[in-house]
Image: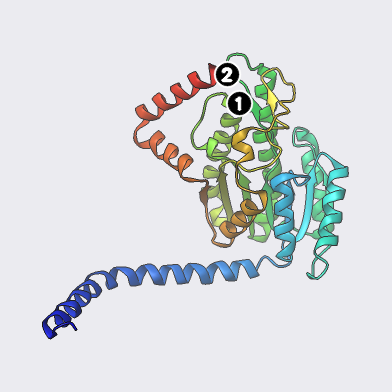
């Protein structure tokens, strides 16, 4: 058995620890509790919201449609492929029969057709009267070095990923501002935070969205419009299959990194949580991309050396 002296020493040890660390731990616990309460309240408030999702015909957009639908939202499915939108709509209605929901509507939309975007948004407003949340998820990737990538490919990537998204955002904003309520959610990429070899066109389009969202967030805050930028790492979707090569042809391969990425369902769940927490700018990625982001801004010389070695390896 322990002696009285040993027990006293042990009690003193835990008393010192509690005295030192408890005052530090309590504020953190209180903050976490308040964040959880806010997240739950905002998640409940999603019920009945009109959510327009681009790129909703497959992959992350399709997963987001299911997540928002389960939250009781009025979903607007937007993409170029009407037949695939019909499939997603059918799945939503058949897979979630026990959830009180609103029938989704389909919006055939080509983000590269800038002149049609305003009329597309107006057609949604005529049906629902509002767009509460715009999820800018539609986009296209590219695989090719900067030198040999045709300028037409650079233009097409920027047209879809940046200008089309900006045009859609601008078309939705006036009705949001008039109501003093709304949220713009843009699905970017960690490659919008730092660039990697053979992704110059794609990274450039995502860097542009980062800047646009940062400026927009400050400008519309007075109108109670929220702007959330999500920067995921690799997600296991068909993005590499549908990517363009430098010549403009379809890449048609599943990258190993993409295949080992997070599931679209997990990514969609994380995005809804980010919205419920009212996040402004969040990276959703494993440790390696987070370290790369930190290196790019903290030790850029090391980051540039690593990227040079990566380019040499990919080119060998």
Say which residue label 2 marks: 146
Along the horizontal axis of the image, is 293 left or right of 235? left
Which residue is rendered at x = 13% and y = 85% of the image?
A: 4
Q: Quadrant of the N terminus?
A: bottom left
User: Can residue 73 be seen in this snapshot?
Assistant: no
In the image, residue 22 lies at what x, y percent? 28, 73
Q: Against 253, is 188 above or below?
A: below
Which residue is rendered at x = 75% and y = 34% of the image?
A: 114
In the image, residue 210 lies at what x, y percent? 54, 40
Q: How many marks?
A: 2
Which residue is rendered at x = 72% and y = 63% of the image?
A: 49
Q: Residues within 10 Å of mark 2 (few under 14, many from 20)?
A: some
Please tell me which residue lies in front, 62 or 160: 62
Along the horizontal axis of the image, is 287 left or right of 273? left
Residue 151, which numbered label? none
Residue furthest toward the top? Answer: 148
Q: Against 295, is 286 above or below?
A: below
Which residue is rendered at x = 87% and y = 49% of the image?
A: 86
Residue furthest toward the front? Answer: 1
Q: What's the coloring here? A: rainbow
Judged from the image, the secondary structure of the residue bearing numbered disc 2 is loop
Residue furthest toward the left? Answer: 5
Along the horizontal axis of the image, is 105 left or right of 294? right
Decide: marks 1, 2 in contact (CB < 8 A)? yes
Q: Against 181, is 112 above or below?
A: above
* Rendered image quadrant of residue 237: top right
Residue 201, which numbered label? 1
In the image, residue 25 lies at what x, y percent? 33, 69
Q: Earlier in the sequence, mark 1 or mark 2?
A: 2
Q: Against 276, is 139 above or below?
A: above
Rounded to the nearest angstrom, the CA distance separating label 1 from label 2 is 8 Å
């Amino acid at each position: 058995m322990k002696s009285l002296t040993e027990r006293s020493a042990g009690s003193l040890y835990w008393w010192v620890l509690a005295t030192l660390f408890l005052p530090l731990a309590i504020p953190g616990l209180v903050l976490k509790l308040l964040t959880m309460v806010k997240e739950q309240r905002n998640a409940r408030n999603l019920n009945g919201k009109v959510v327009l999702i681009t790129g909703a015909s497959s992959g992350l957009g399709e997963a987001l449609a299911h997540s928002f639908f389960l939250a009781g939202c009025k979903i607007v499915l937007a993409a170029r492929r009407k037949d695939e939108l019909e499939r997603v709509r059918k799945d939503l209605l058949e897979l979630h029969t026990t959830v009180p929901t609103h029938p989704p509507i389909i919006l055939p939309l080509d983000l590269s057709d800038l002149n049609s975007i305003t009329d597309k948004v107006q057609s949604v407003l005529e049906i629902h009267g509002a767009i509460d949340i715009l999820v800018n998820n539609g986009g296209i990737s590219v695989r090719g070095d900067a030198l040999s990538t045709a300028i037409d490919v650079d233009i097409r990537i920027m047209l879809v990923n940046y200008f089309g998204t900006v045009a859609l955002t601008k078309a939705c904003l006036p009705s949001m501002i008039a109501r003093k309520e709304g949220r713009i959610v843009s699905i970017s990429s960690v490659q919008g935070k730092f660039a990697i070899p053979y992704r110059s066109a794609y990274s450039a389009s995502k860097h542009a969205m980062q800047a646009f969202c940062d400026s927009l967030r400050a400008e519309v805050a007075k109108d109670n419009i929220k702007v959330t930028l999500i920067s995921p790492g690799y997600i296991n979707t068909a993005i590499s299959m549908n990517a363009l090569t430098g010549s403009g042809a379809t890449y048609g391969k599943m990258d190993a990194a993409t295949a080992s990425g997070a599931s679209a369902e997990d990514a969609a769940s994380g995005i809804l949580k980010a919205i419920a927490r009212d996040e402004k700018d969040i990276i959703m990625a494993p440790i390696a991309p987070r370290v790369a982001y930190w290196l790019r801004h903290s030790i850029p010389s090391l980051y540039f050396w690593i990227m040079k070695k990566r380019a040499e390896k990919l080119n060998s």
